[in-house]
Amino acid sequence: MSLSVRDLRWCPECADERAFETPPCEDGHGLDCLDLSCLDCGFALVVGVLVDDAPVVVELAAA
């Protein structure tokens, strides 16, 4: 079963503009899922937000 949110986007595999749709989402996002797959070749565009709780440490050298 496909959720069929269709959108025209550039497909790197087809090297052309193609129709993409949202595949069935195993994470339960439904139509809000940001993942897309090309209807011609199946190339997947996985779009998401990377969440990393680790603090960022920046060291600056004294001039």
Image (tube, grey):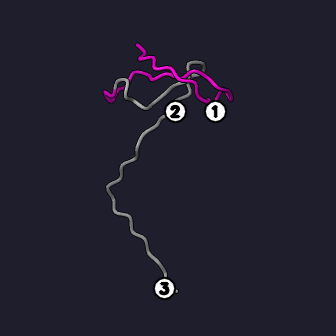
Q: Position of residue 14 (x, y in %)?
A: 66, 26
Q: Hey, which quadrant is residue 27 in on the image?
A: top left
Which residue is disc 1 drawn over? 12
Q: Secondary structure at mark 1?
A: loop
In the rendered structure, does residue 26 fall within the stretch colored magenta? Answer: yes
Q: Amino acid at mark 2?
A: Leu
Q: Position of residue 7 (x, y in %)?
A: 53, 23
Which residue is disc 2 drawn over? 45
**Front residue of 26 and 19:** 19
The tag earlier along the polypeptide, 1 or 3, is: 1
| Chief SS of the magenta region | loop
Which residue is disc 3 drawn over? 62
Q: Amino acid at mark 3?
A: Ala
Q: Secondary structure at mark 3?
A: loop
> Image point 34% across, 63% down: which residue?
55
Vertical comparison of 54 with 29: above or below: below
> Which residue range is magenta in the image?
1-29
Q: Amino acid at mark 1?
A: Pro
Q: Hey, which quadrant is residue 8 in on the image?
A: top right
Left or right position of 38 against 2? right
* CB-based contact (under 8 Å), mark 2 and mark 1: no
